[in-house]
Amino acid sequence: MLVVGLPLRMDGSEGDAAAKVRAFASQLHERIGTVPLVFVDETLTTSSAAAKLREAGRNSRKQKPVIDQAAAVEILNLWMGNDWQEA
């Protein structure tokens, strides 16, 4: 399964960033087409990841190297909770 975070606007609509992600995911899927592709709304995942890192004792400066990884974990957690849509 290829899980891709989709950057939606706060109102749930798609903008330029979502279009770019869909285009990239489409190209990637063409190369590994046997793997199912799903998109997950990544709205506020970075904020959620930052809050969890703060709770774990990491200040803002120490979060920078790992914030994208932590946000990816949030996206996967959303997907595992079935809050996703198939491509």
Image: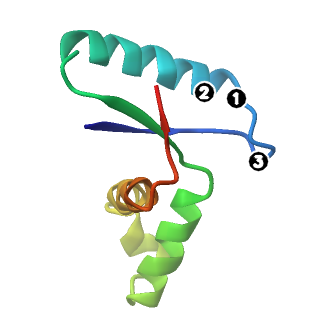
Q: Amino acid at mark 2?
A: Ala
Image location of residue 18, percent across then percent down: 59, 27
Q: Rate crowding at label 1 as few (under 14), some (14 to 19) or many (20 or more) other CA atoms within 10 Å.
A: few
Q: Is residue 17 left or right of residue 74?
A: right
Image location of residue 44, percent across then percent down: 61, 58
Image location of residue 13, percent across then percent down: 75, 33
What residue does disc 2 label? 17
Q: Amino acid at mark 3?
A: Met
Asked whether the residues under the numbered discs 3 and 1 touch, taking CB atoms below 8 Å apart as contact, a structural biologist would say no
Question: Which label lies toward us, 2 or 3?
Answer: 3
Which SS class for mark 1?
Answer: loop
The numbered disc on residue 27 is none
Q: Amino acid at mark 1?
A: Glu
The span from disc 3 to disc 1 (Cα, nearest Å) is 9 Å
What residue does disc 3 label? 10
Q: Is residue 27 left or right of residue 44?
A: left
Q: Rate crowding at label 3 as few (under 14), some (14 to 19) or many (20 or more) other CA atoms within 10 Å.
A: few
* 56 vs 42, nearest the viewer: 42
Question: Which label lies toward us, 1 or 2?
Answer: 1
Q: Is residue 15 left or right of residue 71?
A: right
Taking the view exactly as shown, the residue that stands out farthest to the right is 11
Which SS class for mark 2?
Answer: helix
In the depicted structure, whether residue 40 falls above or below residue 75? above
* 60 vs 66, nearest the viewer: 66
- Residue drawn at x 49%, y 25% is 21
User: Can residue 1 be seen in the rendering of this structure?
Assistant: yes
Which SS class for mark 3?
Answer: loop
- Residue drawn at x 37%, y 58% is 80
What residue does disc 1 label? 14
